[in-house]
Image (cartoon, rainbow, N blue to C red):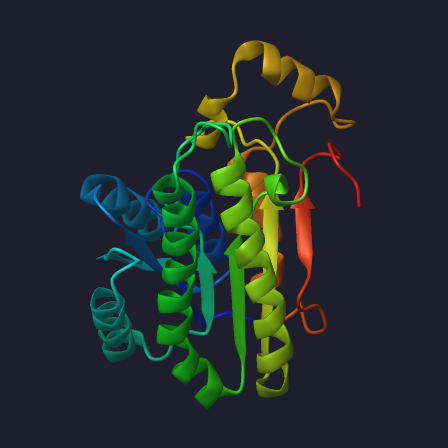
């Protein structure tokens, strides 16, 4: 895939896990990558160094994706250096509690939904002017299979990501005439991420037993799905959800 070479891609939450894997892959495919992070400057700079060592272009930018002023500042900084952002990968994970409904408070459930949607709203609004001006854009949100397939204790994450998926469909309808696609990548459990730590060993074994491909996802598996949606090759898919789960659930 070389069609999007030279495009500017911003990946939120890109200092580790799926975000870091996605940043590396998009850079390897010729995009200039903005590595957004919240706290871990060292990790973000290591992602940038790895990309540059492989011949790619990247910059690390700190911003809380829930802070509109901080995100606007980052977008202005990127535009001054490289021009308008053409690809947004919104991967930043907003904290959430793992509790059953009967134990969760409204602040924990409603707060997660509000923060999830607010962050997506902020980063999307910030990149849309440049995409609209270019007449081309790729927006990819990281969702979760838990939006459609509930799991005990995961109501805060699953419900908030379900809301994000529905917003993506509305945006796909609205932004399509402007040449902007909007899609969701919804992983199942992913090895070596914070979400994977929620699974105890017995639960993990049950997940593996129910997965035709016989393993949990790796961050690189998710990154490849994101990279497809981010590229010129994705000319006619919008408002869709890619389930990266090894066949654990099939719609």
Relative to the observer, which residue lies in front, 147 or 185?
147
Q: How many marks?
A: 0
The image quadrant that residue 8 belongs to is bottom left
Using residue 247 as the reference point, say whether residue 151 is left or right of it. left
Q: Position of residue 125 (x, y in %)?
A: 39, 75
Answer above or below: position of 69 versus 83: above
Using residue 123 as the reference point, say whether residue 41 is left or right of it. left
Residue at 29% of width from left, 78% of height from top? Answer: 79
Q: Quadrant of the N terminus?
A: bottom right
Q: Position of residue 181 (x, y in %)?
A: 60, 72
Answer above or below: position of 94 versus 31: above
The image quadrant that residue 171 belongs to is bottom right
Residue lying farthest to the top in this orientation? 202
Q: Position of residue 176 (x, y in %)?
A: 63, 80
Residue at 60% of width from left, 39% of height from top? Answer: 146
Q: Position of residue 138 (x, y in %)?
A: 54, 70
Residue at 76% of width from left, 35% of height from top? Answer: 247
Relative to the observer, which residue lies in front, 57 or 60?
60
Answer above or below: position of 8 versus 153: below
Relative to the observer, which residue lies in front, 110 or 147?
110
Answer above or below: position of 146 versus 24: above
The reply to whether residue 55 is visible in this rendering is no
Relative to the observer, which residue lies in front, 51 or 250?
250
The reply to whether residue 202 is visible in this rendering is yes
């Amino acid at each position: 895939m070389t069609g999007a070479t030279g495009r500017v891609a911003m990946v939120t939450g890109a200092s580790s896990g799926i975000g870091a894997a996605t940043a590396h892959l998009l850079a390897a495919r010729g995009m200039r990558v903005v590595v957004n992070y919240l706290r871990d400057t060292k990790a973000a700079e290591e992602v940038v160094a790895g990309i540059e060592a492989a011949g790619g272009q990247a910059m690390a930018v700190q911003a809380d994706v829930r802070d509109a002023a901080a995100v606007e500042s980052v977008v202005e900084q990127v535009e001054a250096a490289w021009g308008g952002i053409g690809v947004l990968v919104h991967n930043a994970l907003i904290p959430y509690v793992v509790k059953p409904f009967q134990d969760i408070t409204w602040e924990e459930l409603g707060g997660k939904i509000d923060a999830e949607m607010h962050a997506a709203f902020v980063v999307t609004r910030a990149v849309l002017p440049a995409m609209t001006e270019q007449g081309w854009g790729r927006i990819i949100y990281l969702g979760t299979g838990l939006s459609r397939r509930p799991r005990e204790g995961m109501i805060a994450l699953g419900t908030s990501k379900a809301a994000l998926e529905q917003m993506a469909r509305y945006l796909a309808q609205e932004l399509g005439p402007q040449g902007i696609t909007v899609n969701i990548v919804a992983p199942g459990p992913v090895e070596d991420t914070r979400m994977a730590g929620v699974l105890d060993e017995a639960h993990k074994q049950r997940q593996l037993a129910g997965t035709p491909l016989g393993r949990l996802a790796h961050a690189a598996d998710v990154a490849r799905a994101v990279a497809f949606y981010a590229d010129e090759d994705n000319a006619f898919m919008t408002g869709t959800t890619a389930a990266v789960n090894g066949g654990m659930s099939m719609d």
